[in-house]
Image: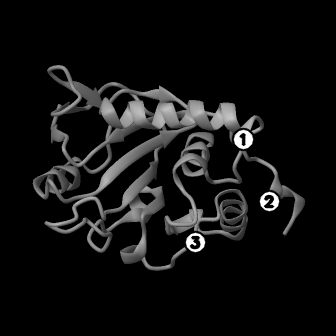
């Protein structure tokens, strides 16, 4: 394991992890709200936000699927060292998946839970170029009226919402920012 693999975790683990956890939970509770998250310096192509999110939410019980360019040795070693999360090459086994929208496609194949256990689904960490409070119109739990967020694949996200209470949950990350889209959120074109 290289020295680089050991670097890039939270510098002040208790403080940074607590702040990152709060940002992750606030974003999921308030769909479309863009939160700052940091404290981690993961290997490329993981953004600082995606790295902090994975450090915060993944552990030895959360298999991670890396899609496309994210599935590289430096990222695998970094995740294994800092989180202990097992890596899977099969999206059907993933609790978390990380990559770009295109690399994570098709959405079919990720666990969406069952009628009895809807919580047994995957959370996708989607790396995007930018996050802005414009674009698709969001409504549902945690949103006062409506919110807006630039989203890739709004049709696929609408189909995901139709599966509720089953379905996938999403975090969108860009640089040191993240926003969330739980399966309960309705997505309409702008």
Compared to residue 126, the image places residue 59 above or below, namely: below
Q: Nearer the viewer, mark 2 or mark 3?
A: 3
Q: Residue 65's spot in the image, x, y percent? A: 49, 68
State the residue position of label 3.
86
Under circle 1, the secondary element is loop
Which quarter of the image is occupied by the C terminus?
A: top left
- Label 3, secondary structure: give it: loop
For the residue carrying disc 1, how many other residues have a C-alpha within 10 Å: few (<14), some (14-19), or many (20+)?
Answer: many
Query: Mark 3 near mark 1, Cβ–Cβ under 8 Å?
Result: no
Q: Is residue 120 left or right of residue 8?
A: left
Q: Residue at x 18, y 59 (%)?
A: 166
- Residue farthest toward the top in the current orientation of the protein: 144
Q: CA distance from mark 2 to mark 1?
A: 13 Å
Along the horizontal axis of the image, is 81 left or right of 175?
right
Residue receiving disc 2: 5
Q: Is residue 176 among the parts visible in the rendering? A: no
Quarter-of-image position of residue 70: bottom right
The answer to which image quadrant residue 75 occupies is: bottom right
In the picture shown, does residue 134 fall above or below 75? Answer: above
Mark 2 or mark 1, which is nearer to you? 1
């Amino acid at each position: 394991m290289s020295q680089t693999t050991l670097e890039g975790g939270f510098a002040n683990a208790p403080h940074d992890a607590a702040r990152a956890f709060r940002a992750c939970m606030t974003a999921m509770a308030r769909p479309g709200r863009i939160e700052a998250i940091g404290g981690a310096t993961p290997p490329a192509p993981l953004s600082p936000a995606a790295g902090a999110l994975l450090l915060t939410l993944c552990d030895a019980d959360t298999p991670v699927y890396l899609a496309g360019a994210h599935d590289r040795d430096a990222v695998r070693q970094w995740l294994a060292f800092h989180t202990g999360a097992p890596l899977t090459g099969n999206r059907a086994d993933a609790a978390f998946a990380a990559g770009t929208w295109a690399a994570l496609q098709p959405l079919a194949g990720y666990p969406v839970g069952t009628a009895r256990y809807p919580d047994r689904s995957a959370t996708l960490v989607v790396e995007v170029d930018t996050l802005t409070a414009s674009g698709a119109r969001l409504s549902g739990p945690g949103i006062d009226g409506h919110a807006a967020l630039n989203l890739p694949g709004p049709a696929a996200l609408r189909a995901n919402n139709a599966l509720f209470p089953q379905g996938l949950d999403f975090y969108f990350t860009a640089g040191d920012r993240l926003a969330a889209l739980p399966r309960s959120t309705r997505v309409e074109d702008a």
